[in-house]
DNA sequence: AAAATTACTATTAAAACGATAGTGATAATT
DNA sequence: AATTATCACTATCGTTTTAATAGTAATTTT
């Protein structure tokens, strides 16, 4: 009898996924990390999405609690927190790729050439994760 | 200067996609149609998700307005409305597949054998759409 | 003709979102 | 060493969205 029993609307896996990521901000925060290398509270705050600090704070706490991200201070700075995606957080990459592709074809074309010219989705998936890992400290 | 300028938070394609489908119910309704062949208001209302009628009404209207679904009465019944996914609505299939796969591996395993044992995502994609079309009146 | 069903709308309470101001700690500057 | 600036938030409060429930009108069934 985990907290999940209260958290999830029903037993459907898709609906349960949406109980976690089905809101206005959760996937946006993950996208900012994954595709735009945003790491600090300030960087998130200054993004084009203009996320309010109270909402940002809430999402980061929740994402940390469910193990999608981790918070770390770098040794030379005791002020700035850095947030990183965990493997669990990175596992949402295919969902974000499909949202990007869907938007590209149905809402507005993406600038990102990797996405616009994608031939092999799985290759893109691996490339995005590789790039993310190479640009962040390995955890 | 479309209404979209007010609707979208920013120019990011992923975020714009989430301006449309990033809430608790929109993708659930589409899933009910696509994977569970729900068509009428009553069928949606009786689903495991227990969607409130006011929310359901609101989502169906919005989805119709943006061209993801159409509402039709069958010739022999003037009371019951039937909702069908359009091609635009069906274009979200890959997003739902990835949510299902993600949930299967990270939240709770799916019953659906097609999804649990998927080898080729694109094949699954085509199969789901084929099945949907075969079970609904072609529009 | 009466009862049941369907597709909603209306209402009101609760939760989430959003804008803005403010605080405490650390870091940078003078 | 003192002052200023920056960063990471929290607090507050008004607005919007969501949720639970009751109710209504039209149609269909009995």
Image (cartoon, coloured by chain):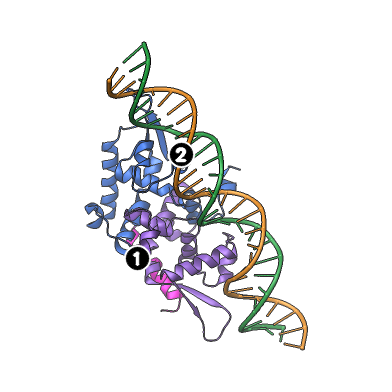
Chain colours: A blue, B purple, C orange, D green
The residue indicated by pointer 2 is A57
Q: Residue at x 45, y 76 (%)?
A: B136
User: Considering the image in quadrants, where does the C terminus of chain B appear?
Assistant: bottom left
Q: Residue at x 40, y 55 (%)?
A: B18
Residue A94 in the image: x percent, y percent? 35, 51
Residue B84 belongs to the span the image colors magenta: no
Residue B91 in the image: x percent, y percent? 36, 65
* Element at label 1: loop
**Where are the magenta residues, as a range?**
B120-139
- Judged left or right of residue A108, residue B22 is right
Measure the alpha-carbon separation of dots 2 and 1.
32 Å
Q: Is residue D10 above or below residue D23?
A: above
* Element at label 2: helix
Question: Could you tell me if residue A41 is visible in this image?
Answer: yes
Q: In the depicted view, which residue is nearer to us: B25 or B97?
A: B25
Rate crowding at label 1 as few (under 14), some (14 to 19) or many (20 or more) other CA atoms within 10 Å: few
Q: Residue at x 27, y 56 (%)?
A: A110
Residue D17 in the image: x percent, y percent? 51, 57
Q: In the depicted view, which residue is nearer to us: A102 or A86?
A: A102
The residue indicated by pointer 1 is B2
Residue A91 in the image: x percent, y percent? 38, 46
Question: Could you tell me if residue B96 is visible in this image?
Answer: no
Label at residue B27: none
- Judged left or right of residue D29, residue B129 is left
Residue B138 belongs to the span the image colors magenta: yes
Chain of the residue under label 2: A
């Amino acid at each position: 009898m985990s907290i999940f029993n209260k958290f999830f609307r029903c037993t459907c896996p898709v609906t349960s996924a949406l109980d976690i990521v089905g809101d206005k901000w959760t996937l946006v925060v993950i996208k900012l990390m994954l595709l735009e290398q945003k790491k600090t509270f300030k960087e998130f705050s200054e993004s084009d999405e203009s996320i309010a600090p109270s909402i940002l704070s809430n999402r980061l706490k929740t994402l940390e609690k469910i193990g999608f991200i981790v918070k770390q201070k770098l040794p030379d700075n005791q002020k700035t927190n850095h947030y990183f995606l965990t493997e669990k957080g990175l596992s949402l990459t295919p969902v974000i790729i499909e949202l990007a592709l869907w938007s590209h074809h149905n809402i507005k074309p993406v600038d990102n050439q990797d996405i616009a010219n994608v031939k092999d989705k799985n290759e893109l998936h691996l490339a995005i994760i590789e790039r993310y890992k190479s640009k962040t400290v390995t955890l």
